[in-house]
Image (spheres, coloured by chain):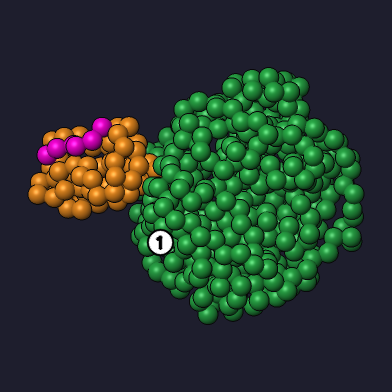
Chain colours: A green, B orange
């Protein structure tokens, strides 16, 4: 078993990883930026080192410095968390070359799954259904129109380099498509320096449902069922739950088995997540694979009783999975909400200093925190400052607990999305499980961005 | 005359128009960046950019004036 781990990340996930290491008797090394010197994870680790300035290039993406500290402190492995270097194949390779274990899959696999086009091709070969689309960038709006005609409207226009919903637009007919094509291409070029556009069939009333998998280095793989993450703003998840209230037993098993077959066929190892869109008729389409721990992994832990970080470390240590598919049981229902430092109406980021923080405690309530009661939430990093995870024996019970917990959740000094979260989970459509990806736009408000 | 204001606190990531340039309603003038999110700030009416009040890399607070359009 690995004895010392450097955590190349920050915020709540760094604290989360340290917690499991402590449970397993593994020593931890935290690395941090100037802006994070006062962050909870820095104090939690056995050792902590400054990487450099606050900008991510100087700190959390500073590969040479991270590797240097790993060597100097005698760390045997690096846990990359999510974001930052977690899906950077070159970093994984550099770790290997430096004699360090990268806690995640092999660099070749990260690279394959990181390229959207190649990942789609690979997974199609492995038997996963894809959203009908076009596999190379479109030349111009005329070609886009021809392709859309063939696929059938409505279609989704997507920028290849897009993120956060920029360069992405649903269009219902040729007029709209021609108009949208150039605008989105220009914007994608301006934002990402790459104006390549793709087209896909628009899946109507879609849900975002993902399958968690675990695979060891001996060809064993299991699925830990699904998480539904349909409630999103700006194409980013806000509420996640397990199990999905929409899937039936048959679809659930079908998706799980398809995911396991796919990861076995590509030779995947460690924890991973396959993201799918599921339409109203319960057809599922592969979107992408995340070759790392997900933000929303706690809801899976709550219903399976497994510690996913522990599993990651064991797999990276060269252990075999010590359970089979039939030994994994799910029990109860779990919901996670992401607490963002942002304006609850415009969703614009809102950095600042926290003046008060009071958190609910009680049965079935779990906190993952990036901040403390007097933290400065910096504009340098992601706006997610905390996750509230609530569990109960049924979905109704979990929602009830979540509503009570949110009612007494207090963060002052900065704007947060707490009012929005309360509005979402108190909505009748949420109770009824009518959670398609347009939930916020449809039931809460029109998006302004 | 209209003042173009920052809708959030963050860094001025890119300035995509010049002083003296005529712009149309809805045209992006400045792109702010904060917490991994880029927000374009667009002109709310057509006109000429009289003054750019910020430089790329500057930190601005919500409500700060970024440019003046007339």
Residue drawn at the location 51% of the way across and 32% of the way down: A33
Q: Position of residue A348 (x, y in %)?
A: 38, 53
Q: Quadrant of the C terminus of chain A?
A: bottom left
Mark 1 belongs to chain: A
Vertical relation: A39 (above or below) A175:
above
Span colored in magenta: B50-55
Residue A137: x percent and y percent? 51, 42
Residue B52 counted in the magenta span: yes
Q: Nearer the viewer, residue A417 or A73?
A: A73
**Corner quadrant of residue A212:** bottom right
Task: Determine whether, in the image, residue A147 is placed left or right of residue B61.
Answer: right
The quadrant of the picture occupied by the N terminus of chain A is top right
**Residue position for label 1:** A344
* Count of marks, rendered view: 1
Q: Is residue A298 visible?
A: yes
Q: Is residue A169 above or below residue A80?
A: below
Seen from the viewer's position, the closer of residues A113 and A403 is A403
The reply to whether the magenta stretch includes residue A380 is no
Res A435 visible = no
Question: Which quadrant holds residue A104?
Answer: top right
Query: In the image, what residue occupies the spot 73% across and 57% down?
Result: A301
* Residue A326 image point, x, y percent: 89, 61
Q: Is residue A185 above or below residue A145?
A: above
Nearest the camera: A344 or A40? A40
Identify the element where label 1 is drawn: loop
* Residue A217 x, y percent position in the rendering: 85, 39
The part of the image, by quadrant, that contains residue B52 is top left
Residue at the (61%, 64%) spot, across then down:
A361
Residue at the spot x=41%, y=42% of the render? A379
User: Could you classify mark 1 by the number of other residues whose Cα lies within 10 Å: few (under 14), some (14-19), or many (20 or more)?
Assistant: some
């Amino acid at each position: 078993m690995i004895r010392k781990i450097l955590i190349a990340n920050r915020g709540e996930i760094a604290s989360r990883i340290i917690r499991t290491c402590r449970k397993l008797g593994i020593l931890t090394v935290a690395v941090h930026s100037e802006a994070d010197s006062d962050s909870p994870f820095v104090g939690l680790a056995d050792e902590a080192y400054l990487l450099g300035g606050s900008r991510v290039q100087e700190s959390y993406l500073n590969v040479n410095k991270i590797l240097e500290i790993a060597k100097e402190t005698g760390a045997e492995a690096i846990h990359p968390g999510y974001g930052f270097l977690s899906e950077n194949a070159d970093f994984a390779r550099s770790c290997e070359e430096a004699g360090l274990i990268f806690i995640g899959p092999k660099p070749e696999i990260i690279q394959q799954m990181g390229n959207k086009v190649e990942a789609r091709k690979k997974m199609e070969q492995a038997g996963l259904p894809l959203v009908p689309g076009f596999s190379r960038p479109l030349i111009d709006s005329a070609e886009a129109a021809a392709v859309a005609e063939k696929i059938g409207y409505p279609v989704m226009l997507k920028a290849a380099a897009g993120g956060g919903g920029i360069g992405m637009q649903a269009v219902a007919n040729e007029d709209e498509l021609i108009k949208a094509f150039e605008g989105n291409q220009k914007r994608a070029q301006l934002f990402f320096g790459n104006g390549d556009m793709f087209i896909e069939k628009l899946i109507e009333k879609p849900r975002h449902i993902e399958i968690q998998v675990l695979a060891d280095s001996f060809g064993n793989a299991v699925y830990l069922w699904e998480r539904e993450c349909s409630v999103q703003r700006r194409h980013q998840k806000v509420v996640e739950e397990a199990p999905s209230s929409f899937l039936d037993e048959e679809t659930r098993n079908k998706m799980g088995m398809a995911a396991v077959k796919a990861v076995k066929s590509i030779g995947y190892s460690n924890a991973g997540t396959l993201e799918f869109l599921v339409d109203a008729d319960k057809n599922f389409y592969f979107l992408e694979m995340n070759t790392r721990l997900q933000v929303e992994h706690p809801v899976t832990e709550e219903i399976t009783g497994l510690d996913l970080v522990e599993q990651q470390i064991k797999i990276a240590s060269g252990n075999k999975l010590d359970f089979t598919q039939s030994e994994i049981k799910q029990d109860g229902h779990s919901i996670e909400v992401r607490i963002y430092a942002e304006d609850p109406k415009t969703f614009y980021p809102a950095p600042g200093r926290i003046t008060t923080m009071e958190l609910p405690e009680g049965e079935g309530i779990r906190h993952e925190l990036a901040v403390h009661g007097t933290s400065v939430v910096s504009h340098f990093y992601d706006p997610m400052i905390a996750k509230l995870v609530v569990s109960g024996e049924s979905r109704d019970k979990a929602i009830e607990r979540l509503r009570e917990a949110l009612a007494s959740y207090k963060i002052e000094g900065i704007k947060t999305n707490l009012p929005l979260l309360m509005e979402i989970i108190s909505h009748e459509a949420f109770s009824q499980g009518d959670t398609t990806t347009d939930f916020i736009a449809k039931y809460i408000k029109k998006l302004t961005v | 005359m209209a003042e173009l204001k920052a809708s959030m606190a963050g860094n001025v990531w890119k300035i995509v128009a010049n002083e003296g340039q005529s712009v149309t309603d809805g045209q992006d003038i400045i792109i702010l960046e904060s917490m991994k999110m880029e927000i374009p700030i667009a002109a709310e009416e057509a006109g000429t950019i009289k003054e750019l009040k910020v430089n790329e890399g500057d930190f601005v607070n919500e409500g700060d004036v970024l440019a003046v359009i007339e």
